[in-house]
Image: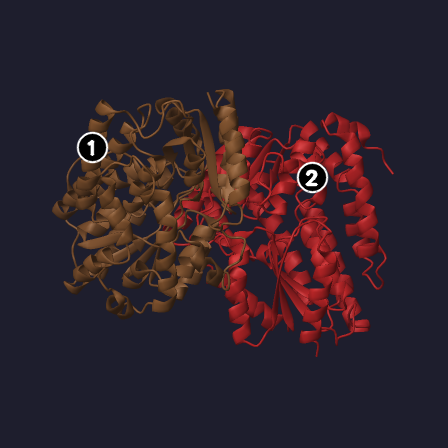
Chain colours: A brown, B red
Amino acid sequence: MTDYNQMWADLGMDLERHDVLMCALPAIYKPMFLDRENRPKAMEYFDYVVSEIHGLRIQEIMEHKAKGGTVVGAFCVYVPEEMVIAADGICVGLCAGAEISVGSAEEILPRNLCPLIKSAVGFRLERICPYFQACDLVVGETTCDGKKKAWEVLADYAPMYVMELPQKKGDRDKALWTSELFEFKDKLEELTSNQITEDSLGSAIALVDAKRAALQRLYDLRKASPSPISGLDSLLIAQVYFNDDPARFTAKTNELCDELETRMKENGGVQESSVPRILISGCPMIIPNWKVPYLVENCGASVVCEESCTGTRLLTGNTNVKGNGVESQISAIAERQLKTNCACFTPNDDRINDVLNLCDEYNVDGVIHYSMQFCQPYMVEAEKIKKALGEKGIPMLALETDYGDGDTGQLRTRIEAFLEQVSK
Amino acid sequence: MTDYNQMWADLGMDLERHDVLMCALPAIYKPMFLDRENRPKAMEYFDYVVSEIHGLRIQEIMEHKAKGGTVVGAFCVYVPEEMVIAADGICVGLCAGAEISVGSAEEILPRNLCPLIKSAVGFRLERICPYFQACDLVVGETTCDGKKKAWEVLADYAPMYVMELPQKKGDRDKALWTSELFEFKDKLEELTSNQITEDSLGSAIALVDAKRAALQRLYDLRKASPSPISGLDSLLIAQVYFNDDPARFTAKTNELCDELETRMKENGGVQESSVPRILISGCPMIIPNWKVPYLVENCGASVVCEESCTGTRLLTGNTNVKGNGVESQISAIAERQLKTNCACFTPNDDRINDVLNLCDEYNVDGVIHYSMQFCQPYMVEAEKIKKALGEKGIPMLALETDYGDGDTGQLRTRIEAFLEQVSK
């Protein structure tokens, strides 16, 4: 293994504390991923990416910075990666998925806040996320109260920039969001000293469209019964989406899909076709947050789809640019983004329709609604989704959990009981 | 006592359940208000208003409806009362301050939601708030995640209309909010069949400006040492502000202020001038939520000011209309409203400055930050406010509580310890 200690030290990281994190990861990754049988061979690449997620990828990012490149960190699919790339930047998802950093965040944030936010802020406070350390700009957004207010606190520790996502999707809101994108363009140009041109933005849009298309291809393959890939492996790919080099991610995901297509012709899926097909719907899951899908699959079900921001909420199709020039491109990005039906919007009935449609497309037997603790938008919507699913005769289990292990036994019991209910 | 049972029955209320609420109120009101010594004589009016809050005031509202008038319910100072009045409507604050209705709301809302929201929804579900029952329109807003998403659920039970309050205060946001007000004008005109004219809106603006001016006068008098009125009595007036007839409220508050001015010349205040002067800052308190200020004053301190939406956040001064016509008036309303520094905005440094200024103006010895449980915006800001106060040497105690009695003993202990710390 390469020794990255010098690089991490240069990034101002707390090496001792970071070692604790790095030592903990393989212990959960091995049983959840490496030890499972019948995995596609192409998953080796994604396993490698995870093993090098604080190593090789950071090294690439540092090489980019050494050549004068910029790094922008984000926590939300509404931060337009295309625009960062068009300004010759790298856009990365920041660490926000681990229990290790929650405690230190609770020293400056209330405990009654979602684990993702606490984890993210804690990663910065503890200096154990190399992406955070490498960032020239951290882009927050006003998607939820917890994030919106936490950015104000985080601004004392990181170079924050906050984009205002509106709360409805009317014409005024589309105009507001488009204006925010234009202001972000100015910010990026100032930060990078690069102009975002029709050419550079056009190439970046094509690059990111291709990345989404590859992920869409993977999701489409999971509609088969049995699914050719486990839910955990598929989730891992959606998670890596936020950190890997876009072109390489696209190529490797397409390679995987080629293998899956062959596998489907030969011997079917990863599990028996008789196991319950589960849709997990709700909050995103950031590496290494695999707790709930692991339990679901370990209890014998197949997670065939995730309706989340590490799932189908990424799959907004190609950016449909009408007309010429950067203005048209940016308007098209805004329009495409607003197809993502986040619970931050009101009303958000389109998300309910999405869930119903996904149940149909993926031939789902039951839905597990996943809320992070204290995530009020998703927790409230769970009730509406349960009602809509009930009318279609599809059972739903609402879970609310954090990043800790304390509730694993209770979750397993509830998931087992639910799977019994939905079993054919 | 007048028998209002027929009126309540006509409003579709659950009389039996409502009786439980009505019987509980005097038992807490008597020791908290009526039994206290040295209260201004003019408080008798406000005591009467509270005793008739579901009786006489509802009768007035029903008479208004019988003449074809409209009733609009709201939960936020950002709902422009002036515009409702200009359309010949009555704008009322809806019940949202009592534990009694929380349990039923938790059947359709998550438990991890602030008590104000759960109480409000529960009042509607249980049919025990006559204001709710009398409403032709319930106006929600997008101030926080909990409310924003709860309105979607409440829409199945009440005629909801949701105004989008932006999350920043830039030019784009001012434009968005002003547009929302124009759209609300259309909605009110459609609902009431009345036109909002320059004349009707001008009169309504003057009426509500006068109401705010009377409350400002009361707050100014509390700057004296000792304060001529208890914090509880003063809070009660700010609470009644949302339900009473505006002109009568103004007259009665000014009468009270006359009496207080006389009292100040004669014998000083309600308490010794040596007791600690406390500012309560944070979430609003809706009738009958008096738990924390009661404890503070019962422990021997004087609450001299409330930085909240049932306090100084109402005191945005007169509406400064520049130019002629309804457009200018509505723009002026928007501009005045945006002086209210709610924690829903980011950044919200003006609230920190407000708190620091109030500490100065009211000669405050200590600040109690009051957050409702799970209210993430205020909970996160508490940390920033504590830091700013610390730099000025002003101690702050952060409390987080709900509407229940379970934590009263613990709160009392913490408040006592805090008051010892700030005692001169």
- In the rendered view, tell whether residue B182 sits above or below residue B304: above
The numbered disc on residue B101 is 2
Q: Quadrant of the C terminus of chain B?
A: bottom right
Q: Is residue B136 visible from the viewing direction of this image?
A: yes
Q: Quadrant of residue A363?
A: top left
**Residue sitting nearer the eye, A259 or B194:** A259
Q: Which residue is depicted at the point 27% across and 67% down?
A: A5
**Residue sitting nearer the eye, A241 or A143:** A241
Q: Amino acid at mark 1?
A: Glu
- On the picture, is B416 further left or further right than B120? right
- On the picture, is A276 further left or further right than B4? left
Residue located beneath label 1 in the image: A259
Q: Output the chain of dot 2.
A: B
The numbered disc on residue B402 is none
Q: Which residue is depicted at the point 22% across and 45% down?
A: A45
Where residue B101 appears, as percent x and y from the top left, is 69, 39
Circle 2 sits in a helix, a strand or a loop, which is it? helix
Q: Is residue B198 visible from the viewing direction of this image?
A: no
- In the rendered view, tell whether residue A59 sits above or below residue B392: above
Where residue B102 appears, as percent x and y from the top left, is 67, 41
Q: Amino acid at mark 2?
A: Ser
Q: Quadrant of residue A218?
A: top left
- On the picture, is B337 further left or further right than A232? right
Q: Label 2: few (<14), some or many (≥20) within 10 Å?
A: many
Give a yes or no on whether discs 2 and 1 share a subunit. no
Q: Output the chain of dot 1.
A: A
Q: Which residue is depicted at the point 68% across and 47% down?
A: B247
Q: Are marks 2 and 1 in contact (CB under 8 Å)?
A: no
Where residue A275 appears, as percent x and y from the top left, is 41, 26
